[in-house]
Image: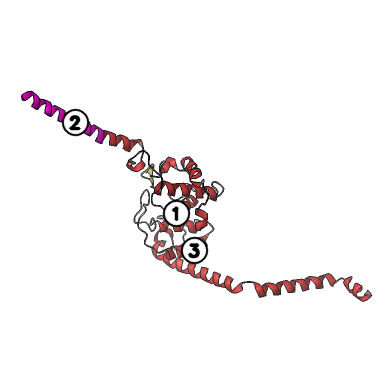
Amino acid sequence: MKKLSARRRHPLAALVVLLFALAITGGAYAAFAPAEKAQADSSAQSLAIDEGKRLFAVGCSSCHGLNGEGSADGPSLVGVGSAAVDFQVGTGRMPAQQPGAQIPKKKNIYSQSDIDQMAAFVASLGPGPVTPTSEQYTSTETDAISKGGDLFRTNCAQCHNFAGAGGALTQGKYAPSLEGVSAKHIFEAMQTGPQSMPAFPESTMPEKQKQEIVAFVRYQANEAPNPGGLTLGSLGPVTEGLFGWIFGLGVLIAVAIWVAAHTTKAKKS
């Protein structure tokens, strides 16, 4: 016992114990860590980036540069993140057909796999908003639609119209209609702020509030009742007044002509 106590008091005893503990910990990690899976994931990511770079060089580099550095014809893509690529390419806005005040939505020419690969390449250029998962843009709360309506009217209606029907902006730009837009693309638009739209990062609008806005927009486009009858595009009093003048006044003029014609016939007879 005295010999054991003496060894414990030896100056190198603590160092020996520490080295022994590190050896056991390292051995356990090497035995149980999913090294093969991590290597496979890394290899798949590298392959996606390489393939995305090839697709980017063919379809995007003429405006944005071979390494996304930007040019006179297109902005730098460093730091825009994978969410911006998924939105712009997924909605067909990119590649753009021609320059203009605003790039319109059109038919998408890439598969989702191609879009994911290009998004992986652009994401490798610098950190930015990440393509959301379905759990991120889907709300399961029962009051999400009502809360989303309040948020939409506060933050979005001034451009996109109270019903999401879109509206005109300055210098030939416009806020597009949100009818038919997928939940993921609505969420990504709030993440990235495409074209004239401001971005709403987590510091400005938390993920939960974005989910609620998505829920309201989707409800408004697909399920909301219309107690007023014919919506006339939900564009507000301008179209309603125009309809009133053209249809309502037209009916009144037709009735007046009919009455005058029959009155003349009655006097002749």
Residue linked to disc 2 = 255
The amino acid type found where label 1 is placed reads His
Q: Is residue 232 above or below residue 64?
A: above
Indicate which disc, 1 or 2, sits on the residue closer to the N terminus: 1
- The local secondary structure at tag 3 comes to helix
Residue numbers of the magenta segment: 247-269
Nearest-to-viewer mark from 3 and 2 = 2
Query: Badge 1 is on which residue?
Result: 185
Q: Quadrant of residue 236?
A: top left
The residue located at (45%, 53%) in the rendering is 183
- The verdict on residue 268 being magenta is yes
3 or 1: tag closer to the N-terminus: 3
Cα separation between marks 3 and 1: 17 Å
Label count reads: 3
Question: Measuring 32% from the left and 41% from the top, which residue is drawn there?
Answer: 232
Of tags 3 and 1, which is closer to the observer? 1
Q: Position of residue 229 (x, y in %)?
A: 34, 40
Residue 124 in view: yes
Q: Residue at x 40, y 64 (%)?
A: 111
Q: Amino acid at mark 3?
A: Ala
Q: Residues within 10 Å of mark 1 (few under 14, many from 20)?
A: many
Quarter assignment of residue 65: bottom left
Q: Which residue bears the numbered disc 3?
A: 120
